[in-house]
């Protein structure tokens, strides 16, 4: 039963708690940044735990020839292991910007799809932005990750690779 | 790679964050009780998500004849789905008290085994106490769950069933 439900339930608990704690003037910003930070460390840890069990996944191996290879790894292996599905669409401008589209993002499917819930979406996406940034960081790739929701539960993560 | 690592990493992040927030006079107590509450809700949610996908696991079905059956479910199915192993030993006084012993509890294995770390153990166990209490609660069984560590990473959860 549990893996997926466990992660989703824990993720909701974290959001709720962080949100309750970081309430104040700039509440939303602080909540989002805390969640992003947690995601970052978990993303790093996931790559580390994988690295320990499987040496193929390090930056020094020929598995990753270039930037695009890193992104394919995130879209396929990494996404599947966390969200049980692949990213649906990957696009790039070939200048270090990658757009990863998930048409049915697991962590948004808990939120109702009404427009009035759109404002809560950033809280449900911040952890995952950090997750991607942390994973890439532990693979030796510095990046900035943002996200945009149009129609829930679809969303697009934008990854800007900093010069490698 | 990820399921287990994901849960463990997220669990650590929560502990760290809750601990940093709930610092004050009675810090440890509040931190532990927050974590227990989160575990409770996640435990409830896990049973619910299972119930939806698999109707065998409700209290109304013949699967659970008596208290002991509930506890066996927690020790086997439930523990395996969360911790990837079964409880190593289950004992009862046949008067509503059950002792569940895990000889290598996953969430303690991150802590070093020195005696000086024993004081941190409650924080690493509170979520799981809540998890068990929440799962039982959603199966219709009220309980009080406590825990005791002797030599890490072994620990014993004590479940006191309130009259059904």
Image (spheres, coloured by chain):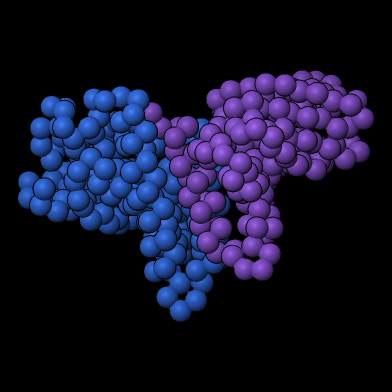
Chain colours: A purple, B blue
Q: Give residue B40's position: percent from left, percent from top.
A: 35, 50
Which residue is found at the position 77% from the left and 27% from the top? Answer: A71
Note whether A1 is above or below B11 in the view shown: above
Residue A164 visible in image: yes
Q: Residue B86: horizontal and vertical position, in percent?
A: 31, 34
Residue B120: name its quadrant: bottom left
Relative to A151, does residue A129 appear above or below in the rendering?
below
Q: In which quarter of the image is the N terminus of chain A?
A: top left
Q: Position of residue A119 (x, y in %)?
A: 63, 48
Q: Which residue lies furthest to the front in this view?
A: A115
The picture places residue B132, in percent across and down from the top left corner, at: 30, 46
Q: Residue furthest left?
A: B95
Can residue A132 be seen by looking at this rendering?
Answer: no
Indicate the quadrant containing the C terminus of chain A: top left, top right, bottom left or bottom right: top right
| Residue at 13% in and 38% down | B68
Q: Is A144 positioned to the left or the right of B152 in the image?
A: right
Nearer to the camera, A19 or A49: A19
Q: Which of B45 and B114 is in front in this view?
A: B45
Q: Which residue is drawn at 7% across and 50% down?
A: B95
Q: Quadrant of residue A142?
A: top right
How many labels, in total? 0
Observer-nearest of B148 and A132: A132
Name the side, left or right, on which B147 lies relative to B92: right
Q: Left of A6 or right of it: where is A96?
A: right
- Please report the residue visible at 66 percent of the width from the left and 53 percent of the height from the top: A32
């Amino acid at each position: 039963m549990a893996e997926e439900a466990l992660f989703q339930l824990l993720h909701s608990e974290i959001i709720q708690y962080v949100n309750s704690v970081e309430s104040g003037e700039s509440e939303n910003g602080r909540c989002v940044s805390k969640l992003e930070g947690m995601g970052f460390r978990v993303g790093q840890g996931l790559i580390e735990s994988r690295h320990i069990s499987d040496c193929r996944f390090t930056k020094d191996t020929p598995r990753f020839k270039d930037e695009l290879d890193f992104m394919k790894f995130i879209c396929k292996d990494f996404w599947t292991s966390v969200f049980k599905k692949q990213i649906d669409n990957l696009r790039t401008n070939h200048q270090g910007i990658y757009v990863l589209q998930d048409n049915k993002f697991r962590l948004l499917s808990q939120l109702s799809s009404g427009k009035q819930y759109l404002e809560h979406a950033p809280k449900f996406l911040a952890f995952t932005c950090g997750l991607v940034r942390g994973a890439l960081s532990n693979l030796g790739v510095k990046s900035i990750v943002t996200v945009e929701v149009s129609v829930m539960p679809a969303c697009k993560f934008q990854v800007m690779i900093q010069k490698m």
